[in-house]
Image: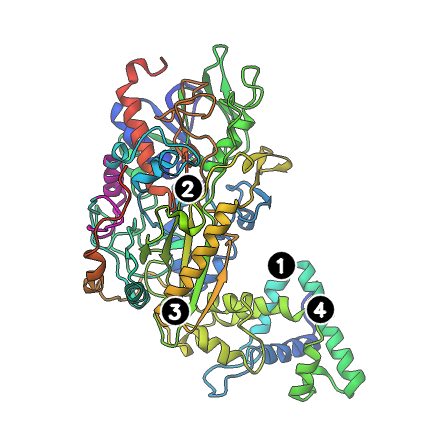
Amino acid sequence: MSVTDDPVDVLIIGAGASGAALAWSLSDTRMNILCLEQGDWMDPNRYPGMTEDWELRQLGDFALSPNARGRREDYPVNDADSPISASMFNAVGGSTILYAAHFPRLHPSDFRVRTLDGVADDWPLDYARLAPYYALNERMMGVSGLAGDPAYPPKTPPLPPLPLGKVGETLGRGFNRLGWHWWPSDSAITSQPYEGRAACINAGTCLLGCPQGAKASTDITYWPLALRRGVRLATHCRVREITVGANGMADGVIYYDAEGREQKQRAEVVVLACNGIGTPRLLLNSRSKHFPDGLANRSGLVGKNLMFHPYAMVTGVFDQRLEGYKGATGCCIMSQEFYETDRARGFVRGYSFEILRGFGPVSTALWGMSSGRMPWGADHHRAYGELFDRTAGMVVICEDLPEAHNTVTLDAELADADGIPAPKITYRLSENSTAMLEHSVARARQVLEASGAHDTVTDAPLRFAGWHLMGTARMGTDPERSVVNEWGRCHDVRNLFVVDGSVFVTAGAVNPTNTIQALALHIADTIKQNLANLFD
Amino acid sequence: MGHPLSDDQRRTLTSVLDELIPPSADGRLPGAGALGLADYVEQVVQATPELAGMIAEGLATLDDTARSRAGRAFADLAQPEKVALLHEQPFVFPLMFHVFTGYYKEPRVVAALGLEPRAPHPKGHEMAPVELGLLDTVRRRAPFHRAC
């Protein structure tokens, strides 16, 4: 599509999880809405799962790290000063193209961290406020799961749970032996045909895009509906900066089109939906006389308080074959036995266990090699035979707490293909996270052994697990201690909104996409309710 | 390996591959060299000039050392001699990565592992529905999320 400089009512930057949800919600206003996306539409017929060498593609054009992929649509991230590297994808659908689609909600306690545990800050909204938006988002994305989970207030996923498979059943029995909580995962993957989408066929290629359309990436959920209602989406448009008028309000953006030409787009309202690294990067790149330290950054908090979820991966080796190559890669069962704070454990807050499937043939060899269990030579086939289809992995997702020294800044030298300064992340694990990881790894081993594993292998913290990017433009009611208010509007710029994971006050200990989208829907609804006096 | 391998280099590489992944004792799985993996390995390492140089140098060193110690080319050594020489070579570990990835994507190998050698889509895999009885004890548990 062609884009002109005619001003639009709402300009959304980023077509991923949150931008899509917001665009769809706002589309019923009939406003003139345009989304600029630096990536392109993906062609599901060309996803790696359609090819025999699909496992190798994880090491190349479908690698988790944009640095490893090196596609023009991506931007590099300097992650040398962090034990966790950033994983993201740039396309219509954003990182939902590659995510596992594990779709839990936060707990009510996650919104009251300061009150309950005396750390970090409370959110300026609560679980009850978000609950209807969670439910709406779960319908829109098509979530499979099971009602009745005692770890949560009542909720009812719209579709029945995905198969547990031998891996889930084996680990479920292990949890039962210990008397610990577990439950089928809430998964944004269709267990049955749903709203024009086919059901999951258990192909096990979720992290490489879903050719079946069973996994809910927003290019196949929100976007078709939003486009049908008149929203426009322009791809290969990479925003360099948000511009500010004489009145200190955002008045548009400067971006590079597919041919690398500089373009200007004016807008009445600008919405950032670029993830917890892309959003602070863009704000910091948007300097002006009104905002010499970066747009909407009078608090100095843009780019501060970067939160990942520190992950550990603990893999068990079993005697029996587990058919772990079957099934949704990251969506099997979850345990929240250790989610809520118990100070006797030596840390505050908590963690979730998520059970993964096993490895494919190539991944088995590479994992065996990296863990020192896969020799070359005469013993190779014995060692391979002991691992192939006999492993079950579990990851631990630890809650990260906001710390000002964990940051996204601009790299002095690194830039993307259009010459826009790239982000640099600086991050270290806190003592609380380190203690939590240690506790969780010991419990993970306990579960695997109770499930019958004769050996376990631990990788912690898991370097490539920077999937969850949060906290770098956090919400709050105090302009000195937060960047946006309780409905995503920047304190400093009243026609500028943030709807991605940047606004998280704390991280919880679950995958954030459901919460990111529920927040985007909440913010969109609040914008609609305040249209008459949006900038007051 | 800035240019295609010579016949001698290819013979050495094939012999190395058969040592890294030899045929399985039951004969179901071929050696990596016999499988014809040299073409694949040559192709992928060319994309990494540093590795290509390291491997080209390593193959030459292997042959030179074999000739100086035993008077024969590496490929003509007895198996224990080959193994001993390979343990001295720093290129073996980085080469393993490409050998393993190439070997375990081969249809003949995948089939020998008990899987259908095909793309995962569009056929997918059959799985049994959830056995909810496993959850009986969890279901009986009282809600344990903190009230706020």
The CA span between labels 4 and 3 is 45 Å
The residue that mark 1 highlights is B47
Q: Specify the subunit that label 1 lies on.
A: B
Magenta stretch? A132-153
| Relative image position of residue A476 (x, y in whole percent) | 40, 26
The CA span between labels 2 and 4 is 41 Å
Given the image, on which type of amino acid does mark 3 rest? Glu
Location of the N terminus of chain A (image quadrant): top left
Given the image, on which type of amino acid does mark 4 rest? Ala
| A141 within the magenta span | yes
In front of the other: label 2 or label 3?
Answer: 3
In front of the other: label 1 or label 3?
Answer: 3
The residue that mark 4 highlights is B56
Tell me if residue B23 comes above or below residue A424 in the rendering.
Answer: below
> In the image as oriented, which residue stretches furthest toward the right?
B68
The residue that mark 2 highlights is A94
What residue appears at the point 45 percent right and 73 percent down from the top-left corner? Answer: A387
Left or right of A55 on screen, residue A321: left
